[in-house]
Amino acid sequence: QVHVVESGGGLVQPGGSLRLSCAASGSIFTIYFMTWYRQAPGKQREFVASITSGGTLNYADPVKGRFTISRDNAKNTVYLQMDSLKPEDTAVYYCNANLGSTRGRGSYWGQGTQVTVSS
């Protein structure tokens, strides 16, 4: 069994910062890449940032220069440092882990964590 759990969301004022965490646990052999997505009310889920096992980073244009993705391989955990937050960053943030486990290679989602940027 594999579990992916996000944490760190909350309410923050415009210009503020938050750090999200995503931990994968279970019978995991290797994590190939981990990705953050977000979904705002009434909108489709969209890509935010990703990091591969080798450390290759990728960001969506709206968050470049403000968000930083990083990874602790020993803890099977990925972080999303979000700075200079804007109201349009308000969304539920989801983590996806593409990994190999006793069940083979698969893609696993967390339950999401709410981020609200408002004064």
Image: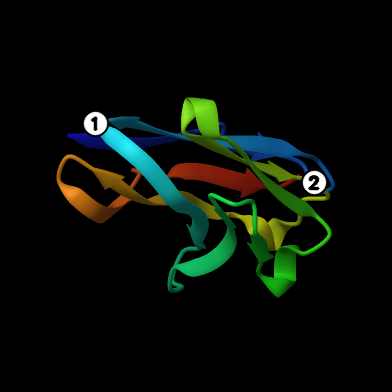
Judge by depth and name the residue closer to the eye, 99 or 95: 99
The answer to whether 14 appears left or right of 47 in the picture is right
- Mark 1 or 2: in front is 1
The residue tagged 2 is 83
C-beta proximity under 8 Å, tags 1 and 2: no
Specify the amino acid type for callout 1. Ser
- State the residue at coordinates (30%, 50%): 108
Q: Earlier in the sequence, mark 1 or mark 2?
A: 1
Kindly tell me whether residue 27 is visible in this rendering.
yes
How far apart are the alpha carbons under marks 1 and 2?
Answer: 34 Å
**Relative height, residue 75 to residue 51 (above, below):** above
Q: Secondary structure at mark 1?
A: loop
The disc at residue 27 is 1
* Quadrant assignment, res 80: top right
Judge by depth and name the residue closer to the eye, 102 or 39: 102
The disc at residue 17 is none
Specify the amino acid type for callout 2. Asp
